[in-house]
Image: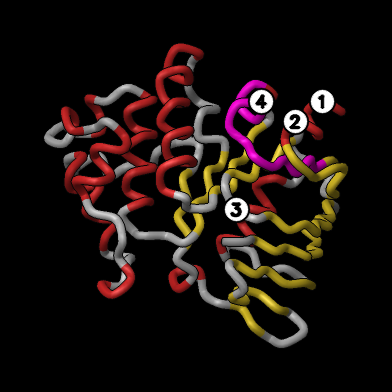
Amino acid sequence: MGLDIDVRHRLGDFSLEARFASEGHLTALFGRSGAGKTSLVNVVAGLIRPDHGRVLVDGETLVDTAAGIFVPKHRRRVGYVFQEGRLFPHLSVRQNLRYGEWFAPRDRRYATLDQVVELLGIAALLDRRPGALSGGEKQRVAIGRALLASPRLLLLDEPLASLDEARKQEILPYIERLRDVTKIPIVYVSHSVAEVSRLATMVVVLSEGKIAAAGPTAKIMGRL
């Protein structure tokens, strides 16, 4: 499943210009804070309508400004995990996970609760509330909720940024497993060289709203 992006957008004094294509797996958007990574992810998610350009996922057009196409965010089947898990504090882990299923049409559901729980190692957490979870556990539950929406694309916006080093090392193997087992294409936002080198199959380097480099991880990170 491929991702094809060619967009231009202006946000105040900031100008975003991004053009690249990815064949799936895990594509990292890498760069310093303010480089435009989250803005680009928000264009893909449908939270920002770009001034010009197009976005295609697996050949399906989500945005084409020339043709007047803009698929609403709730119809894109894109899972989005933020820096903070944003779990519902009054619901149990099981109920938070089940909430994700509401966004998946019945005829397009491919993920089950048991599969996601096993994949992310969260069986022991199902009856807990978010307030009783560590930061790493919250992020695994947030990823699980996104997976239960059966997305065709998963967006992870610096999911480890708020975690200490121990919690990062706890969750990294699960993200690797997510990449290798599910085959869902992932766009992973980060400014960490270590995370990108370990997780990404392709790297897109953003600098001041423009793409400075894009290609296989070993080639790009070696150049950097």
Give how far apart the Cα atoms at labels 4 and 2 are. Answer: 15 Å
Mark sitting earlier along the chain (3/1): 3
For the C terminus, which image quadrant? top right
Question: Residue at the location (25% across, 28% down)?
Answer: 131
Front position among marks 3 and 4: 3
Residue 20: image tag: none
Give how far apart the Cα atoms at labels 3 and 4 are. Answer: 20 Å
For the N terminus, which image quadrant? bottom right
Do the residues under discs 3 and 2 have CB atoms within 8 angstroms? no
Name the amino acid, label 1. Answer: Gly
Question: Residue at the location (65% across, 74% down)?
Answer: 63
Is residue 224 among the parts visible in the rendering? Answer: no
Label 1: which residue? 222
On the image, which quarter does residue 201 sit in? top right
Q: Position of residue 119 (x, y in %)?
A: 31, 38
Most foreground residue, 13 or 39: 39
Mark sitting earlier along the chain (3/2): 3
Do the residues under discs 4 and 2 have CB atoms within 8 angstroms? no
Q: Is residue 217 magenta?
A: no
Q: Position of residue 99 (x, y in %)?
A: 25, 55
Give how far apart the Cα atoms at labels 3 and 1 are. Answer: 21 Å
**Could you classify mark 3 by the number of other residues whose Cα lies within 10 Å: few (under 14), some (14-19), or many (20 or more)?**
many
Q: Secondary structure at mark 2?
A: helix
Mark sitting earlier along the chain (3/4): 3
Residue extending farthest bottom? 67
Q: As drawn, is 68 to the left or to the right of 154?
A: right
Label 3: which residue? 24
Label 4: which residue? 192
Label 2: which residue? 218
Do the residues under discs 1 and 2 have CB atoms within 8 angstroms? yes
